[in-house]
Image (cartoon, helix red, strand yellow):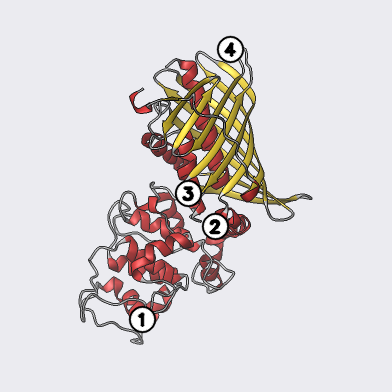
Amino acid sequence: MKGAEKMKKAIRIILVMAFVVALFATTALAANYEFLAEELKDMGVFKGTTTGFNLDREPTRAEAATMLVRLLGKEDFAAAEFSSGNISHPFDDVAEWADPYVAYLYSNNLTNGVGADKFGSDRLCSAQMYCTFALRALGYSDALEGDFSYEDALDFAYQKGIANQTLFSEGFRRNELVAISYQTLATTIKDEDVSLLGRLISDGATDKDSAKALLEKIDIYNEILSSSSAMGDVTAIDASITMNMSILSTVLNTSIPDITSDIKMKMTDSDMEAEIIMTIPETESSPKTTVKEWIKDGYIYVDDDGQKYKTPLDTMTPVDIFKQSYATASSNITGIYILDEISKTVTASGTEYTITFKKNLINELISDTLTSIKDPAADFSFSIENMEETIVFDKGGNISDVKIFVKMGLSSENTGSIHLLFDCDLKINNIGDAVSITFPDFSDFVLLNLQAS
């Protein structure tokens, strides 16, 4: 495939991925969370071991018990109560350092042992077990007729936004324990209007000054979640994107203004219909290009300036990236740790939230996505240098506009090293039943096997 065609496909991938991030940049990532561990350490929530954080190894039950007590804000209280003999436990396999934590949990019916005199301190803690602990810290009960059962703890944690299936792609280590703990601090306590971190501060369990920056971020973050929660129920969307792009490379320096894309998506539990019409305006080196893509009846149909072909949806495509990301985001899974900074501005027309993303995590997300897809443009590698998003809510509380600015590097064997600078302005035209897609006659679209190309 020629370099120009490769570039055109790359632009399509970038556009769809920008749309995904702009609307739903909330997906948990499998990454290294040492920077989160440092933040938690500063607040006294995570202290590591004598040899460091040890994020790559699996946590023990004793370590998980310790984290639960800290998330409950009872570390000092547990130490004092244990020292005075007011709380205790019957287990003979608990190390001295863990005695106060296990005693507090046992005395308050928050944990049991693995036997009459065994806590199982050195046994490994699973994701299911730690999510259960985190949910208890938020006030949810797994007792009989409670909010959830131990068996469905992971599903309940996904629903409450403190975890994500992708978070456990590399197993459950102290690394993932840190991510869940961080997200749990940002989550609102059951039946209350305060985050867990806010409660810890008000109870004096965490130093207010050390937690001030995170608390401010959490408060704005939860405002965004509350305002955009209706998007989780949206099964159809009609949006328009205008994108301006600058491309700098050893062989090409050009700007492409006003790349437009009209996107319509209709989703069900088992099916998806979609239409994406992208227009790249004329430049000095290339004519105006219009690419149309549709999803219907298990196929993606492409009309690339008159070249018409179709391929089964079991072959990953740029639109398929959106489908998977939409499904993940619509399940109300969030990750405050993907966000670097958040600010809020109230205007005459509504409220604007500006977000900068942690570029290292975005890079890992894009790298994992490109590795998994099977597309001729997938040999491109990306490196995000900066990513910023502004979400605009109108006076009625509905998302009306999403703007995203990205500075990135791109490279491949065919095009060499390229630097890209682009900004997108996404306007939501309609959602729900108002969205309508008109499909063309697909009888002259040629079946194409992308895997064999």
Mark in the foreground, 1 or 3: 3
Q: Amino acid at mark 4?
A: Ser
Q: Quadrant of the N terminus?
A: top left
Q: Quadrant of the C terminus?
A: top left
Q: Amino acid at mark 1?
A: Asn
Instruction: Please state if 331 lies on the left or on the right of 261 as rendered.
Output: left
Q: Which residue is mark 4?
A: 285
- Please provide percent x and percent y for residue 84: 36, 86
Q: As displayed, is residue 82 above or below residue 149?
A: below
Q: Which residue is mark 3?
A: 327
Q: Which mark sits nearer the N-terminus, 1 or 3? A: 1
Marks 2 and 3: CB-CB under 8 Å?
no
Q: Amino acid at mark 2?
A: Leu
- Please provide percent x and percent y for residue 383: 46, 32
Q: Which mark is residue 214?
A: 2
Q: Amino acid at mark 3?
A: Ala
Residue projecting furthest to the right: 348
Between residue 10 and residue 387, name the one nearer to us. Answer: 10
Q: CA distance from mark 2 to mark 1?
A: 31 Å
